Image (tube, coloured by chain):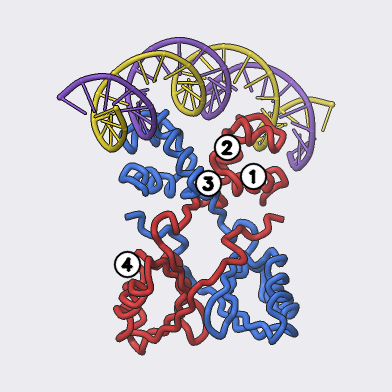
Chain colours: A blue, B red, C purple, D yellow
Amino acid sequence: MLDDIDRRLLAVLVEDARLSLKELAARVGLSSPSVSERLRRLEERGVVRAYTVDIAPQALGYQLQAIVRIRPMPGKLHVVQQLIEETEAFCECDKVTGDDCFIARLFVRSIEELDRILDRIADKAETSTAIVKSQPIRRRPPPLA
Amino acid sequence: MLDDIDRRLLAVLVEDARLSLKELAARVGLSSPSVSERLRRLEERGVVRAYTVDIAPQALGYQLQAIVRIRPMPGKLHVVQQLIEETEAFCECDKVTGDDCFIARLFVRSIEELDRILDRIADKAETSTAIVKSQPIRRRPPPLA
DNA sequence: AGACGTCGGTCGATATCGTCCAGCATGGCG
DNA sequence: CGCCATGCTGGACGATATCGACCGACGTCT
């Protein structure tokens, strides 16, 4: 599905998605029109979902990050999910197997804000909160191999 | 720290980090040299950590995603952390407060692979694994406001 | 085997873009 | 009030992207 050049291209883009086609071409050993065409096809096939920017949350004032396990009370699953989705501070949320129905990541400016947000779910779900102390691995793509 | 134009610029880049300076300039209502200068300073100040590409894991053959809570046995914390870091299938890992020392995200091609990876930690830590069924929120930046 | 279509590539020309520079407007401050 | 620092714009020039034409490898059909 992906050949070796595609993988190298992706690996380069993971590091810097704003490199020029010319530069990308030089890195993978093709001409720039070829790279342009490959990118187009990777996007078209849905391999590349987006080019995006990685912003330091601290720069936006988010000093705290928490991971919250959420177990909605009987019948409250959809309400809870909706509530999570529309709370912008939730920046990642997975619906998972097991007792905890959702596992979500929360960016907040203070403990007070964390408390305020969790309070809004408190009557609809049980939550377990873990504050992030450090990030041994900060978001990386799975091996391209 | 960030003015309104910076925030709009970031918001646009979150959607498409490969837009040309000219296009970015048009979106925020400035000239391209101004945008260029703003980006340079955002990068310099560490607000922008990187421009990157969002790759569909399925396209790379990763059919399964799991979230694993990891509680190293006494004295094994560092060994376990090292093991996690060098296992490329772990694509995100947070060190958190609470009983679970680490919470990590794992991309695998099959249940067998999941089992194999967790087996390698089994004698050094207790793990609880939750398979991701869906992603109500798939990685977004916290509100720029 | 040979003709042919397709796919993915290069090359060169042209259009578009990025960068540099000079000059100007604005706001803070002595 | 005058000065300086900051941040913006516009234009010129070099760099880059894009488009069209062409090429070669490969698989298929006759």
Residue type for callout 4: Glu
C-alpha separation, residue under disc 2 versus residue under disc 1: 9 Å
Residue beneath disc 2 = B19
Q: Which residue corresponds to the image point at 32% horizontal and 73% vertical from the top-left?
A: B83
Discs 4 and 2 share one subunit: yes
Residue beneath disc 4 = B86
Q: Quadrant of residue B12?
A: top right
* First in sequence: mark 2 vs mark 1: 1
Marks 3 and 4: CB-CB under 8 Å?
Answer: no
Q: Secondary structure at mark 2?
A: loop
Nearest the viewer among A29 and D23 is D23
Q: Which residue corresponds to the image point at 64% horizontal and 67% vertical from the top-left?
A: A90
Q: Which numbered tag is attached to residue A51?
A: 3
Residue type for callout 2: Leu
Q: Secondary structure at mark 1?
A: helix
* First in sequence: mark 4 vs mark 2: 2
